[in-house]
Amino acid sequence: MDIGPIYELRSRLRAAAIAGTGLLSEDFRLKRAAEAMKPLETSSPVFAKIVQTLNELLSPGCPNPAGALLDTITLTDAVLCTLGTFEIKESVTPIEATKYTKKTVVNTPYTILNPLLEALTTSGSGHYNHIYHTHQTNPELFQDYRVKYALVQALGASYAELADLAESWLKMEDESILPLLIKDFEPNGKKEMMRRISVIDYLAKGSVNDFYLKMLETAQKDMRYALICALRHDTANVDMLFDMVKTERGKNKQAVFRALAAMDDERVSAFFRDKMAKKPIEVVEYLLLNTAPWSGKLITDTLNNVVPKLLKISQDEINDISGVDAKNCNRAQKIKIFNRSLNKLALNKEKIENIKIFNYCMLGLLNKSGEEINACYRMLYAHKEQLDKLRYIGLLGYNDCDYNFYKGIPACVHDLDKKCFEGGMMTILFLNLMMKQNDGLKALAMEFYEENKNYYYLPAAIVVKLLEGKDCTKWLDGQMAEKKHYLETIQTTLGHVYWSEKTKSYAFRIDRSCERDVFVPNLKWETKKELIFDTDRTLSDSAFAKTMLSWMMNHASKQMDEIMFRWIPKDQQELCAWMGEWYYKRALSESKSYRYLMYLDQCGWSDCKGLGIKCAKDEGTNLFQTYLYNILRFLPGSRQGVVAEAWAVYEAIKSGEIIVNKNQINLDALGEWIVQFVEKGVN
């Protein structure tokens, strides 16, 4: 049925209302619209009624034309409202949806969503805090397609911290975000496009190889470097990369080597084996993150070749180079000794080179597994006493020349030369286990620990126990029964575990790693690996979490509380409520408990009674106005509870229960702020 005539009729009726009923007899357009309605008269009683009122309106003897006109307009509007449609003159453009689009919009009020969109797409003070807090309290908003689009735009934010935050959140998305990242991509763009390609590389891997190739046609400088590195995901690019070895220069040539080194291909293996004979240190750096079997074999073959040469360095030569007091020297003195050793070894450059090759290859063991790797660890373990003597002439150490290699490695690797050799070796095995869970490596770690029962070997053993996904608390207690100081080592190791909201499982994180130019400039070294539980485990994730969290509670400290927070599955309400009660009691008993407000907020805790007063008392005369506002702003719970606690803080300061510096706290301003922010919700 063509309902166009009723739209035309409404338009003519409204025009008649503006012109006045005195001109109805002369309005030929209205009469023509009335004629067009007659075919619809028999289709529905309501259309028949409209035609009837029209006839009455247009008849010469209509007793009340104004009333008839109003009735006709009202009836016409009612029909159009019921039809629920609209008309536009332009052609309709469909929403741009792709096969990746799973969710388009979230049913969220405009008053909540619009400030978030504005903060993501415009510059201004307070935007970062608003975005971050919204992500913490309402993460579901970031599933809205409009917010995802704004988050992509935020990659170009002038505030670098916000752009970095947007990049880290986008890397937690799935492939549905790719069309937004690829749309309007500029191959010679600046930081925004560099962040885009970083996210695309991270999420898409080789699925958008054609995109990389197309962008590479015109890309220059850092963008060209990043796109070349992205070619590593598809072995179909091998021949082209070999050609680029001859044509690219400088940094871009390094990118070609990095891309090739990441591939599992026989041609690439042969290429780097030849190159290893000429430039071993350069090759090992390229192989640092390679997980292909050939790369591990290349590293171990090199170590098996160089270790016998190092073992030939005599004790007299070591003493002559290092000095008799080397073991009692501090860090700065050891560096001086090492520099002096380089001068004394200047007549034998081969020894210097062998030490450097050894140091690089030891880190090259990271992210590798296989029989060759296990055998290499055993070989090193067998010679640990002899190799330990070489620490004072640079073994497991580094100097300024090598810093570009070491700077991207987790900070705990930087000071390997401070430990005995077996301590340094087990640190590498510990990191290796978190990156590459392999049955051979796990068995090796437990074998070494059982033989030594030394805290150097304990972290790797703990990782193995965690990977079993079973209750290992009795085992942990057993280790501490022998040596109580093991608690610190256990605590540090547990701190590498966190609950992944994205994968709904536990994962490892190697914290405090430095920036590293590995594949994409300014890309952080990727060291997160999902924690793979054994398939025959008897405990569910929830039971495993509660068991481990209960054990940590028995060894409570502020540092342990922070570690526990990373372990909490935030989507399990029962666990969150249980942990919320724990943190509430801790916040009321521990000094400097401001950080506990974040824990309580994330656990969904709803009681803030006493928290504001406790945090303010902790600061005392060091409390200043802005910090007090932050305490009140982040109190957990209902608005009613927060209001009550805010005024309780006000009264406690006024009465002298909380002693503050009056030059730093203005009570009148505090009262006004409470009314505006807490009671009215205005920041």
Image: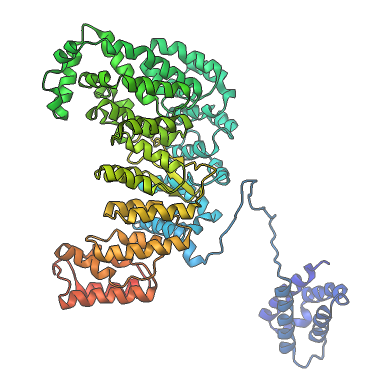
Q: Which sits in the foreground, 280 or 35?
A: 280
Q: Which quarter of the rendered picture does the C terminus lie within? A: bottom left
Residue under the image location 79 percent in, 90 percent down: 62
Residue under the image location 15 percent in, 18 percent down: 322
Q: Which sits in the foreground, 652 or 40?
A: 652
Q: Which sits in the foreground, 14 or 587?
A: 587
Instruction: Name, please, the residue furthest toward the bottom.
Output: 63
In the depicted structure, whether residue 136 falls above or below residue 460: below
Task: Give the x, y percent position of residue 203.
Answer: 52, 40
Q: In which quadrant of the rendered view does residue 415 lie?
A: top left
- Count the labels in the image: 0
Residue under the image location 31 percent in, 10 percent down: 309
Task: Give the x, y percent position of residue 439.
Answer: 48, 32
Q: In which quadrant of the rendered view does residue 213 lie?
A: top right
On screen, residue 141 versus residue 653, left or right, reads right
Is residue 257 in view? Answer: no
On screen, residue 48 versus residue 413, left or right, reads right
Is residue 485 in view? Answer: yes
In the depicted structure, whether residue 632 falls above or below residue 150: below
Q: In which quadrant of the rendered view does residue 335 lie?
A: top left
Task: Give the x, y percent position of residue 337.
Answer: 15, 20
Residue under the image location 52 percent in, 67 percent down: 109
In the depicted structure, whether residue 452 falls above or below residue 503: above
Q: Which quarter of the rendered picture does the N terminus lie within? A: bottom right
On screen, residue 336 versus residue 112, left or right, reads left
In the depicted structure, whether residue 256 falls above or below residue 541: above
